[in-house]
Amino acid sequence: PGVAARRYRLVRLRNGLEAVLVSDADADEAGAALSVRAGSFDDTLMGLAHFHEHMLFLGTEKYPGEDEYEKYLSANGGMANAWTADEETCYYFNVNADALDGAVDRLAQFFIAPTLDRDAVEREVRAVDSEYRMALQDDAWRLHSVLKATADRAHPFSRFSTGTRDTLLTEAGGVDALLGELRGWNRRRYVAPAMRLAVVGRESLDALEKLVTAPGRFGDVPAGDRDVTTLAPAWSTGETSARVKVAPVRELRSVQLMFALPSKETLRAHGVDGANPEVLVSHVLGHEGEASLHSLLRERGWIDALQCGSAVSNSGGQLFELAVDLTEAGDERCEDVIDLCFEWMGVAKRGAEAQWARLNEELRLLGETRFDFSEKRGAADTAADVADALWDHPISPLAGPLVGGYDPKATRAVLDALTPENCLVFDVRASHRPDESWVKETWHGASYTNEPLSDVDAARWRRRLKETAADLALPAKNA
């Protein structure tokens, strides 16, 4: 049975914590996730949020053993993990269905009374430092660090966020100073109004609600005041209209055309129910059917893959990308590939409002069908997705990034952003030959150069937006 067999309930606890309960009578595993609206953007020392995530796993007042949580889960067929992002940190687990009660109790203690013990500080700093050093030759991390280097230097996205011994222990001034900073950060940031919880189990919804709200559990997380910061965009006219060339470690050949967009919240401010304009535009630009860019480039043997969507998204704005993985032949024709990308975006920009309304409706119906008939995912993955989605979809977090109503103004805002002046060309190819003009990125050491777009390229791409020579067209109406 698919997800339609599950039952759902949204509850708000007295301390301001919000939770989604998912009842699945046929489940043989259970899970939960808690997303905290606190992440690397909130660092007072570079890497502090990530370090804090590590420390929460090492004991609570109720369960002081450092490995108590993971021992319980392992003994009951489960596991736990966490991740720290720019503005959120998510903790999640899965466990045998009959062991959910004990697992939920242990997770709740992370946020009520963690020990944050002094004896663990240096060891976990070493663990964080080791993670950083293991990623020094990893292209994904190296490229992400270069992207950070292209952002406005005053924006928190531009900061290093993994953490090292120097950024944590040395910068703080020793173990006691770091521990004091950590505990203060925990008190300020880990408050109930900044938390969203999801629990998946085979119990009834009433039983799941009792499990979550029992004394000594999530209702006892300190209430406090959620600190809401207003962010500016990380990329604007000072950072776009540029071409960044990066020399990768591996034999990579990719080009990402990235465009600064307003935040998701801003794009949804028109009040059209369920509007998701950047998802609509990415769906159309990433279309793989007849007369699509993907079809044309594959036919010419120039790409292996094409992707489109939000490469970066935070409360200050987004980077929307149209990206291609090039073949060896495509590497040699890279400028032609980029020209065709702009031609394709021109086709989209000239699309009539009626066409976009029709494409939105087709995508809305497709999304509903996929949700109704989709297979159930694992309990931990489901819980993590739902808890995180509560921030963007507080009323209906279950359907994910489906489009709802069509918002012509918001859709046009996305399309209008697709210009050379607003573009950051991220050109990552092993065929690059760095010279003395290239620089080394500070944290992961990638060689790169960041130069303004040439007037010739910008003028050519503006022409391509207006005059499409290739056989490209928006998707035809579904039969």
Image (tube, rainbow, N blue to C red):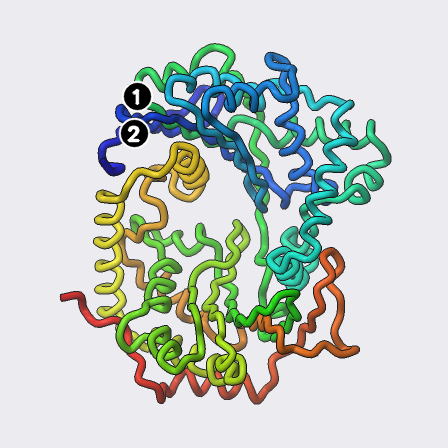
Q: Are discs 2 and 1 less than 8 Å apart at CB?
A: yes
- Residue 51 image-quadrant placement: top right
Label located before the other in sequence (2 or 1): 2
In the rendered image, the vertical position of residue 45 relative to residue 32, given as above or below = below
Residue 81's place in the image compared with 407, above or below, is above
Which residue is pictured at 56% across the width and 32% down the height? 226
Q: Which residue is mark 2?
A: 8
| Secondary structure type for disc 1 | helix
The percent coordinates of residue 271 (x first, y second) are 33, 50
Question: From the viewer's perspective, is 170 left or right of 377?
Answer: right
**Residue at the spot 45% in from the left edge and 68% down from the top edge:** 322
**Quarter placement of the C terminus:** bottom left
Instruction: Indicate the quadrant containing the N terminus: top left, top right, bottom left or bottom right.
Output: top left
Residue to which mark 1 is pinned? 205
Helix, strand or loop for disc 2: strand
Q: Is residue 346 visible?
A: no
Query: Is 468 above or below relative to 176?
Result: below
Dot 1 crowding, Cα within 10 Å, few <14, some 14–19, many 20+: many
Residue placed most toward the observer, 29 or 421: 29
